Image: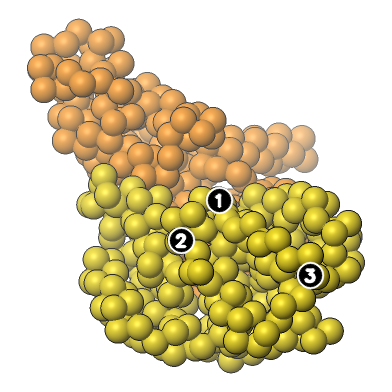
Amino acid sequence: MTPDDDILTVDGLTAGADNAAKVLILGCGAIAREILALKAANGWDHVALTCLPAILHNHPEKIAGAVEDAILKHRSDFDTIFVAYADCGTGGQLQEVCDRYGVEMIAGPHCYSFFEGTEAFAEKAADEFSTFYLTDFLVRQFDAFVWKPLGLDRYPELRDTYFAHYTTLVHQVQVDDPMLTAKAQECAARLGLTYERRFTGYGDLETSLRAVAQG
Amino acid sequence: MSDQEDDIILSELETAELVLQMHDDLYDGLKEEIEEAVNILLERGWEPYQVLTEALVAGMTIVGNDFRDGILFVPEVLLAANAMKGGMFILKPLLVATGAPRMGKMVIGTVKGDIHDIGKNLVSMMMEGAGFEVVDLGINNPVENYLEAAVKEEADIIGMSALLTTTMPYMKVVIDTMIAKGIRDDYIVLVGGAPLNEEFGRAIGADAYCRDAAVAVETAKDFISRKHNQLAAG
């Protein structure tokens, strides 16, 4: 069953009871759908998934602590825990937590990077610093992650204060969906940015998880 | 803060009451009301510096404190800042003309690859409010911009801002270049931005990490007074 985006944003996702699970992926709610899709497509039945609330994306200072709490909660139940976060604005704090508990995590600065492939993303970074990225999840949850937290629902006049230096909204597409493309175009228009659609698939997320699942 | 703005005629308020109303209006981000009130105080014979400090800066201090304490959030602070900007626009030429006290000079900008300038703009405005002359280098500054401007403007302070963990290491490039050129100790280097912390500031060799605009102002004042004390002692 596809998890509800609003629930992923606020509550995250608790792994379904799978007594055979040996590996726990402890991830961000913003990539829960993608991880579940990879799990289903590859038959990773020994892999369980727990996701923290996706809205932590907007509060990176809370991510390392939340992941640490979750590691402590779950580590006695699994042989392996893999943290499906990149640095995600923690400034190395998440890596420190993972190192402390001997847990692996996804390489790179954030999900925009690992969906495109961190190496390729880094090569383009210098030319794309005025780009605003949205993944499929963030397009679906645009109001909860962008519009409302920035106060644009209440003060639309602030739009240019936030976005005047941006030029382009790149929609990183994980799964083809014309409805979502239309919504992403609308998001770009609301922010006053040029729209660019960029198919990424699952990028480094897939390779990272495959390595863990096939461990 | 108040729901009664529509009923209040600013020009009919006693001066003390008007100043308190300005604090409320700043809090509520009411730019036109602030501009009107600034003009009223000037017409009543207030010195521009007094309007700046007692009405605008005092009001923004309340805003800053409530932001720090989690009562106000970024959108509301931006609206308040925009209102203050309206008042500052009126006062700035008058402050120069009346010889208001100058604290020192700062060049400030976001680092190379970083276009996020909200924090930098807040710091610039509050530094100006505190009597500093600010040369705003804007966004996406390579090391040359900082150093050329610092020399040209005879600045006391170099301020660097970054929002991204991927761009904040560039601050070290600037400081290392200053060291290589033998000019590091000629300037006070202040750094800030959401992903930074004190440890990072120390690690890259900055003089201080500033958590927010109010801290930046206090830190800058502190370093400038230390500098003056050193000069006096030397």
Of residues A129 and A205, the one nearer the viewer is A205
C-alpha separation, residue under disc 3 versus residue under disc 2: 23 Å
Labels 2 and 1 within one chain: yes
Of residues B125 and B78, the one nearer the viewer is B78
C-alpha separation, residue under disc 3 versus residue under disc 1: 22 Å
The residue pinned by badge 2 equals: A4
Instruction: Please identify, in this view, whether the residue under mark 2 or under mark 1 is nearer the observer.
Output: 2
Of the chain colours in the picture, the one used for chain A is: yellow
Residue A61 spot, x, y in % from top left? 64, 51
The residue pinned by badge 1 equals: A11
x 16%, y 35%: residue = B32
Q: Is residue B86 placed above or below A43 in the rendered structure? A: above
Q: Secondary structure at mark 3?
A: loop
Of residues B12 and A175, the one nearer the viewer is A175
Q: Secondary structure at mark 2?
A: loop
**Chain ID for label 3?**
A
Q: Which chain is orange?
A: B
Task: Find residue B22 and report its image quarter.
Answer: top left
**Chain ID for label 2?**
A
User: What type is the residue that disc 1 sits on?
Assistant: Asp
x 17%, y 18%: residue = B4
Instruction: Please identify, in this view, whether the residue under mark 3 or under mark 2 is nearer the observer.
Output: 3
Q: Earlier in the sequence, mark 3 or mark 2?
A: 2
Residue B231 spot, x, y in % from top left? 71, 40
Residue A175 spot, x, y in % from top left? 44, 84
